[in-house]
């Protein structure tokens, strides 16, 4: 099992991502939505992976939703870093990690551009349940 550490710039949000994959096995996905384009979001996930997410001060964390409101972007209010997005599907959290919050790693796979504009909310949730990280523990 490989462990990847990530955090926001000021350290208020920290996570450990565990996966059988290594850095070279991931293909980052560059999202084409307006929010991710503005912030340079590029994401990785592993449906068999595990995330432990920790907040030093949860009052300094913004859970931002937009569009179809099917995911929360986890953003530090102190430093502004977007660490991940979490989607709650049938009372289970799924997540995708912004590689920009994991500066100690180099994901060598060529990033692919994604565009999910035509998806219905149900299609979006089904895709996430299949492709996003399937075990998310939030410790606050």
Image: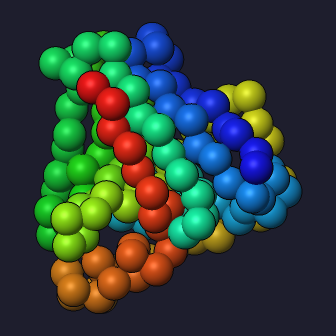
Residue lying at 59% horizontally and 43% vertically, measured from the top left: 17
Horizontal side of 16 relative to 116 (left or right) equals right
Horizontal side of 137 relative to 58 (left or right) equals right
The quadrant in which the C terminus is found is: top left
Horizontal side of 116 relative to 123 (left or right) equals right
Which picture quadrant has residue 110? bottom right
Residue lying at 22% horizontally and 21% vertically, measured from the top left: 58
Residue 51: give x, y in percent of width and height. Answer: 50, 45
Q: How many marks?
A: 0
Most foreground residue, 92 or 74: 92
Residue lying at 19% horizontally and 81% vertically, measured from the top left: 121
Most foreground residue, 23 or 89: 89
Horizontal side of 17 relative to 135 (left or right) equals right
Residue 44: give x, y in percent of width and height. Answer: 59, 57
Residue 50 visible? The answer is yes
Which picture quadrant has residue 28? bottom right
Question: Please, is residue 122 above or below residue 38 in the view?
Answer: below
Residue lying at 46% horizontally and 14% vertically, measured from the top left: 11
Residue 61: give x, y in percent of width and height. Answer: 24, 26
Most foreground residue, 20 or 132: 20
Residue 31 visible? The answer is no
């Amino acid at each position: 099992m490989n462990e990847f550490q990530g955090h926001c710039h000021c350290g208020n949000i920290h996570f450990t991502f565990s996966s059988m994959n290594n850095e070279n096995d991931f293909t980052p996905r560059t999202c084409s939505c307006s929010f991710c384009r503005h912030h340079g979001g590029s994401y990785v996930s592993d449906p068999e992976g595990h995330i432990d997410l920790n907040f030093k001060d949860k009052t300094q964390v913004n859970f931002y939703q937009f569009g179809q409101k099917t995911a929360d972007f986890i953003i530090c209010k102190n430093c502004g870093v977007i660490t991940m997005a979490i989607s709650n599907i049938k009372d289970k959290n799924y997540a995708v990690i912004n590689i920009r919050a994991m500066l100690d790693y180099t994901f060598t796979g060529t990033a692919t551009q994604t565009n999910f504009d035509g998806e219905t909310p149900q299609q979006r949730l089904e895709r996430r349940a299949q492709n996003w990280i399937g075990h998310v523990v939030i410790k606050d």
